[in-house]
Image (cartoon, rainbow, N blue to C red):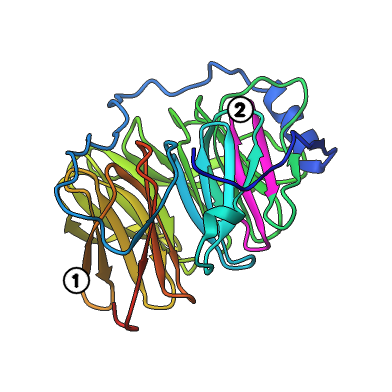
Amino acid sequence: MRCKGRRHPGRFAAVSVAFASALALALTGCSSDEQPDVQVVPPATAAESPVTSVEPDGEVLPLDLSVTATAFDEATNSIVVLVDDELLYFPGSTQDPMSEATRVPLPGPGTSLTLDGSGNAITAAGSDIAVVSLENGEVRLASPSGITADWTAAVSRPDGTIAAGTARGQVFAGEDGERPVTGLVSADVLIASGENLAAIDRRQSMIIEVFPERDTLGFALRAGNGASNAVTDGEDRVFVANTRDGELLVYTLDRLVLRQRYPVPDSPFGIAYDAQRDRVWVTQTGLNEVAAYALDTGIPVEVARFATVQQPDSVAVDSTGGYVYVSSATGGGVQRIALTTPDE
């Protein structure tokens, strides 16, 4: 790895929070084998990318590690990447951001990365949920002691609590000791949009409403045959990459409805939302490309396209600064693309 930044030791501050104690009570009162007997599909994965035949657009920041997920935190102006059992973050607007990179060890391999909007990154990292301060690199654990769970997703809710999902299909959120919501095969992605909470179950290729306060699931809709990743605009809409079928799907959560469906071939996988321009960015790993889609008409309309690093499995947008970041899952670096005009 060509990264000269600071490395923080394992400063995992075990916090005794209501989330942890409530989750412990909830999971101990629920069988870990409580899963639905339903037809499942293999979880969709990104297609293996061809060797790049053209130079990636923009500039490529050197990072010879495989990036699992990418996010941009506006509160700290930081690019955040998940790399196995480490979280890396670095300033987004400097000329040589990698020289200022901070590496933070996680308690286990990370499978998800979300932001709370207040300068913290939240990761599902093996048997723990880790909350990482992007101000100082401090890590606190927000999962219960004595409970073995394979955490797959975690997201902050408007009230400051954390919703967390497991590989066994459990979803927990709240502070009052309620049982986790069950009924999914796996809770692979969690989406918090306003007061609404939803999950992507990759093994059922389904999007499902989750109501922790009622200990139940709500409406569910099939998301093609291979839903993989999802992102929200924070205003009720959820954008889903249907990787296996080659589609971009747009749902609303106030009432779970499929609003738009648009073909995006060649393995759409990474997905991000640009709030300032109302654009969805989707990577296509089969092409080594990333495209932006406008959403102000009846169907998504492609408005930009760029060549990327090899295996572009994740993407993030700095809406204010005007940059798109695309990360390689094969050690090809983190690509920074400037949006030179407001409409690009």
Residue lying farthest right?
16
Q: Badge 1: how crowded within 10 Å, few (<14), some, or many (20+)?
A: some
Name the residue carrying label 2. 108
244 part of magenta stretch: no
Q: Is residue 214 visible?
A: no
In the shown orientation, is residue 23 left or right of residue 46?
right
Query: Looking at the figure, which quarter contains the C terminus?
Result: bottom left
Give 241 or 26, whichever is nearer the viewer: 241
Give 94 or 33, whichever is nearer the viewer: 94
Q: Is residue 37 above or below residue 142?
A: above
Main secondary structure found in the magenta portion: strand
In the shown orientation, is residue 217 left or right of residue 341?
right
Q: Is residue 126 visible?
A: yes
Q: Is residue 148 above or below residue 243?
A: above
Residue interval drawn in magenta? 115-132
Where in the figure is residue 301, as x and y percent of width and height? 19, 71
What amino acid is at disc 1?
A: Val
Q: Residue at x 49, y 55 (%)?
A: 71
Say which element carries label 1.
strand
Where in the figure is residue 114, as x and y percent of width and height? 55, 50
Where in the figure is residue 171, as x and y percent of width and height? 57, 37
> Residue 315 occupies which quadrant of the picture?
bottom left
Mark 2 vs mark 1: which is more N-terminal?
2
What amino acid is at disc 2?
A: Gly
Say which element carries label 2.
loop
126 part of magenta stretch: yes
Name the residue carrying label 1. 301
Where in the figure is residue 284, as x and y percent of width and height? 23, 49
Q: Badge 2: how crowded within 10 Å, few (<14), some, or many (20+)?
A: some
Residue lying farthest bottom?
342
